[in-house]
Amino acid sequence: MSKVRPQSSPKSKRVSAVRKSASGQKSLVRARAEAKAAIAEARRAHERLRDALDILPEGIVFLDADGRYILWNQQYADIYKRSADLFAPGARLADTLRIGVARGDYPEAAGREEDWIAERLMLLANPRGRHEQRLSDGRCILIEERRTAEGGVIGLRVDITEMKRREASFRLLFDANPVPMFVCALDGGRIVAANDAAVAHYGHGRDALLGMGLAELHDDGDLPDLADESADAAGRTFRQRKADGTAIDVALFSRLFAWENVPAALVAAVDITERKRAEARVAFMAHHDALTSLPNRVLLRMHMEEMLVRARRNGLGVATLCIDLDNFKAVNDTLGHPFGDLLLQEVAARLRSALGEHDMVARLGGDEFAVLHPDVETPAEVGALAECIIDVVSAPYSLDGHQVTIGASVGIAFAPVDADDADRLLKNADMALYRAKGDGKGACRFFEAEMDARLQARRRLEIDLRNAVAAEALEVHYQPLIALDRRNVSGFEALLRWRHPEHGMVPPSDFVPVAEETGLIGAIGAFVLRRACADAAKWPDPVTVAVNLSPLQFRNGALLQTVKDALERAALPPRRLELEITETVLLDRSDHVLATLHALRALGVRISMDDFGTGYSSLSYLRSFPFDKLKIDRSFVRDLGSNADSQAIVRAIIGLGESLGIAITAEGVENEADLACLEEEGCKEAQGFLFSRARPQFEVLDMLAAGSRRARDVA
Ligand code: C2E
Ligand code: CA
Ligand code: CA
């Protein structure tokens, strides 16, 4: 780059020319020229200032001490919608005010125009600082006026109409909002505004509220971070307190904004107390039993998982105890469900009080409970706990004016020895319980691997039985009932037989309970009824057929129709069908069972009570339904010859039958001695291996044919 040589300006040339002049004339000329230049310079500066002012968004005006316009910018003229020539230098504010008043620009001046103008002019002497002015067209102007050093006024005008409108709609949204809302200072959280909903909700008066910090509403006094707008849609939840001391849960939503030009937080407080309470209730209900408030199976399992993790860490065991109440069903049936509920609640309370603080007791359903006992060192300690549970539950109850006693059976399994996951542990404890129940009331059993094997076998049996039903592989055999006076067959009892492809004949005592548990009994029972009626229809009248009914067949409501169908299909007269039920059918005290029995009897079918003498309260059942026959259980018949007690019982039953007009049949007669005894006591009908085992239909037909031949021969 080349060096720039200094150049002489035209002005410096002129100055040197003047300097060269010697006369006073010359200096006058020079002074005039200089003044002219200065004025031109000042005008240029003025122009530049105006240009600069025109760029500003605010309107700006300078007035001298006499109220004459010195300077204004375009925005000033625009705000008042005046043409710029109105403000020609030298024009007075008073004149423009007068014109404006005449045009109706100042609504506040209406009716007092001269006074208003005078007031405005007065202000010039003493500017008001900042204030707002409303124009006739609805616009709102912010005015800021200050005195200048020369005694004039410099004024600023900003059109804040839009801002005012926004503020008004904010006001409306804020004040009338049904959600409690606050405006809080960002620094310290002081409440600077509160809407009506907030005043009403918190119960502090508005004045009290406005003096407070938001944190004072909080239970823990912690100030939420108001600047944190990141809270999700649910807001941040806090526990607060109302003026009356009530604790509430609120979700706070805060947004930053400018409140009267100061940064502030707009805070909405949504009361979620009810929602939280409802959520807590739902959560509790999902994990607890409604009747006893004990944890339910879901919570037990969750807890179990935790304990198993802990056990893995500390090397100690976890015991699971499954508890089933003995005799509960009978109490529930006899004294009614409301009483049963009371009893379960009392059992729950006793269990809870009998356990340590680290133990958990849950209700699994019905009369089944489970206890989790962590940190087990020896099985003996759990055995002792189980005994304690049995004792506590077995102590007599005095509830609602009744004295009752129930018992408990307990099955125990350990982690990690018996199982190391929650499901298996619970299952194994349940299996041990199953065994405990089978071993008699009040027993406690530890899980053994062999129980699992047995359960597996049972499960296989269930599958096989399903297949057998589907393939119609079940048979019905018939055992004769002998009329003792004539020594001939009066009827047959239908007994189920299952010829298993691998296990041979499976006795009904093995598979009927499986059928009952799996619901297969409905289909099987209907099959026996149809088969027995069809077979009996081929026997000579009046030989009867007796069919055993499971209590579960009374449950589904189809029994009456099933019996009718079986009779109709076989065209068997109802009087030739007997139905054998046990006392367990009557344990269900519902009207439905008795109604079904009466309806069956009304058909002409006879009803026998099976296994009489083995139940709980046989005599009372005799009153509840008019039985046609009692079958003395074979446990009394078996040792009739040798056991005086059995003899007394059989004698009593036969006497009872005679006086009530109920026929008596003795089951399980195996030898002549027992038969002789029975005959001596006046028994009229008997059944047992002494006469015959149950036989298939073709043998029965032979037997009947032979019998009638013999009868003919005798005749
Ligand atoms: P239950 O109704 O008491 O039937 C009589 C049982 O005693 C039969 O056993 C029969 O074979 C057996 N029995 C008969 N005479 C003698 C005897 O002199 N000595 C001995 N020791 N036993 C004798 P089963 O056939 O094994 O039936 C056992 C139980 O299975 C029946 O007892 C009954 O409760 C149930 N059952 C059998 N068939 C059916 C059925 O079709 N439906 C229902 N629900 N249960 C049935
Ligand atoms: Ca029977
Ligand atoms: Ca029986």
Image (cartoon, rainbow, N blue to C red):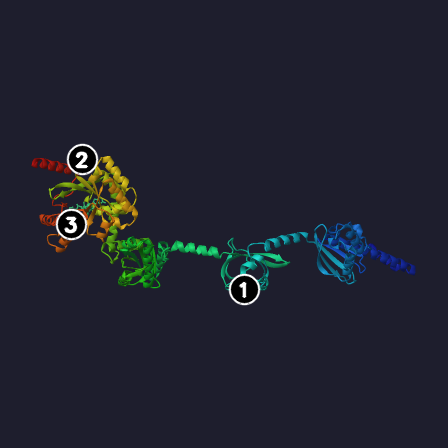
**Label 2 SS:** loop
**Label 1 SS:** helix
Task: Say what amino acid the circle numbered 2 marks.
Answer: Lys
Query: Label 2 vs label 1: CA separation?
Result: 94 Å
The numbered dot on residue 654 is: 3
**How busy is the neighbourhood of tag 3: few (under 14 within 10 Å), some, or many (20 plus)?**
many
Which image quarter: residue 534? top left
**Label 3 SS:** helix
In this orientation, does residue 378 appear?
A: no
**How busy is the neighbourhood of tag 2: few (under 14 within 10 Å), some, or many (20 plus)?**
few
> Are discs 2 and 1 less than 8 Å apart at CB?
no
The numbered dot on residue 538 is: 2
Task: Say what amino acid the circle numbered 3 marks.
Answer: Ile
> Are discs 2 and 3 less than 8 Å apart at CB?
no
Residue identifier under label 1: 216
Residue 691: x percent and y percent? 12, 44
